[in-house]
């Protein structure tokens, strides 16, 4: 059998969590594998690897996307934010705190994706009702919790973010 | 999962993308948002040798008004179609369709042009654009041509675009006063794809009778299907619950639904009549406002 043709790796410049990375990537490298294997940012998970489960959700230029369905070369010049970029030093993002306070996880596998989707939701709709939260989570699957505590976690975070420094 | 190896070129203009298409021929494939193509490549259902990325071409995104048409750039993502004030004001059905595609993350990345050119028989945009009588603008080295939506979707995953053309914009006629539009969908509960969907565009005279209508049904065949019998049945009639129900009952008459593992042909035919009725009723309500 003939060997598969090889294609040269391409230079990309991708800013991840505020840090610019100049790297070489094969055209077929998916963004999630660039993050996990080239940058060692393993907080972003690969779940289904078929654009269904949302475990790989990151923000690409401020929007939640499934990084298993984006080529790293497509992110050339873009800003990416992952779960590692949410906390401010030792201070968790309110959504991360919410998942801890309301026990919005069991095994934790889906949690990074859930949190990234929830952060995107609260950035676009700071005061979502239960239906809006559930609708926003359509692309994130959790096989443990039944989602009840996940919704509670996001509501907690919304309250905290509204309260500013009070809490 | 990884796609098979391929070369990647970020096109900087439509002209460059057209040149690259000519250069690579059948080994090349256009990439828009990649939300149909990349999954297909990961499953090795498609293994193009070269991807020509349109995501790096400026000027293909956004919604604007040009005369009596709404113009939507081919690279506009579903989320931006759904939230566009112009779309919501002039053709709420199109915003409704965009808002029920996939999930939030998919809508943030998938593009209207990619969806239309991919022509998945279970996609939302082809159905609503058929009811809206949209035109699809294709650019080639020899210029632009507008393809009417009724001539565009030719078979499963097949369109009237030829291999030397790029879909650059979708033009939707802005409906005249007294017109309402609506899109309703029965999604598959796991995938979110269309099992059956219906779109209606209804123009209503002040007296309450129907002066014009276009109804399209999705999920029944290789692509969107006009429900001509329903349209004829509504023509000139008062838009009452009874006449709408009678017209909607004919929504699946011209179709020969494809039975699949989710739904049988008879079931799909029945759902088509129910969803046609819902779409018409909502369009009529909106027309009255």
Image (spheres, coloured by chain):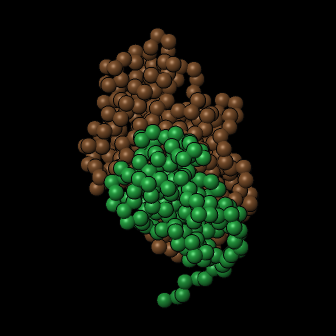
State the residue at coordinates (46%, 32%): B182
Outermost residue on the bottom side: it is: A1
Near-viewer residue (B131 or B183):
B183
Outermost residue on the top side: it is: B207
Near-viewer residue (B255 or B108):
B108
On the image, which quarter does residue A5 sit in? bottom right
| Position of residue B157 measured from the top left corner of the image (x, y, whole percent) | 47, 55
| Position of residue A123 measured from the top left corner of the image (x, y, whole percent) | 58, 47
Q: Is residue B65 visible?
A: yes
* Letter of the green chain: A
Near-viewer residue (B47 or B35):
B35
On the image, which quarter does residue A14 sit in? bottom right
* Letter of the brown chain: B
| Position of residue B242 measured from the top left corner of the image (x, y, whole percent) | 31, 19
Q: Seen in the image, is B133 located left or right of residue B229?
A: right
State the residue at coordinates (41%, 48%): A152
């Amino acid at each position: 059998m003939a060997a598969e043709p090889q294609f040269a790796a391409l230079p990309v410049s991708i800013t991840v969590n505020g840090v610019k990375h100049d790297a070489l990537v094969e055209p077929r490298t998916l963004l999630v594998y660039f993050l996990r294997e080239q940058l060692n940012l393993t907080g972003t998970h690969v779940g289904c690897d078929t654009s269904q489960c949302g475990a790989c959700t990151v923000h690409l230029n401020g929007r939640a996307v499934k990084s298993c369905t984006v080529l790293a070369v497509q992110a050339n010049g873009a800003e990416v934010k992952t779960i590692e970029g949410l906390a401010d030093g030792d201070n968790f993002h309110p959504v991360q705190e919410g998942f801890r306070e309301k026990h919005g996880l069991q095994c934790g596998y889906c949690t990074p994706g859930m949190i990234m989707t929830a952060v995107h939701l609260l950035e676009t709709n700071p005061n979502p009702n239960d239906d809006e939260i559930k609708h926003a989570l359509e692309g994130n699957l959790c096989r443990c919790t039944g989602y009840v505590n996940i919704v509670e976690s996001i509501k907690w975070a919304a309250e905290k973010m509204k309260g500013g420094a009070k809490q | 999962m990884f796609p098979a190896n391929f070369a990647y070129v970020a096109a900087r203009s439509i002209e460059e993308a057209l040149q690259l298409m000519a250069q690579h021929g059948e080994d090349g494939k256009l990439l828009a948002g990649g939300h149909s193509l990349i999954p297909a490549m990961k499953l090795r259902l498609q293994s193009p040798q070269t991807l020509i990325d349109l995501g790096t071409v400026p000027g293909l995104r956004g919604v604007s008004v040009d005369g009596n048409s709404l113009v939507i750039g081919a690279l506009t993502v579903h989320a931006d179609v759904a939230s566009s004030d112009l779309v919501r004001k002039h053709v709420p059905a199109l915003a409704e369709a965009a808002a029920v595609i996939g999930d939030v993350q998919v809508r943030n990345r998938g593009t209207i042009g990619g969806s239309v050119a991919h022509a998945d028989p279970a996609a939302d945009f082809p159905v609503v654009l058929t009811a809206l009588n949209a035109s699809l603008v294709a650019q080639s080295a020899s210029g632009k041509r507008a393809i009417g939506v009724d001539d565009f979707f030719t078979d499963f995953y097949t369109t009237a675009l030829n291999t030397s053309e790029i879909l650059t914009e979708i033009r939707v006629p802005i409906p005249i006063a007294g017109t309402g539009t609506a899109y309703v969908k029965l999604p598959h509960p796991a995938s979110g794809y269309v099992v059956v969907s219906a779109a209606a565009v209804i123009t209503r005279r002040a007296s309450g009778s129907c002066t014009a209508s276009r109804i399209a049904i999705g999920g029944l065949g290789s692509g969107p299907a006009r429900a001509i019998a329903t349209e004829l049945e509504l023509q000139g009639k008062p838009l009452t619950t009874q006449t709408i129900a009678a017209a909607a009952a004919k929504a699946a008459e011209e179709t020969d639904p494809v039975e699949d593992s989710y739904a049988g042909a008879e079931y799909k035919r029945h759902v088509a009549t129910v969803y046609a009725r819902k779409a018409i009723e909502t369009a009529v309500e909106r027309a009255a406002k």
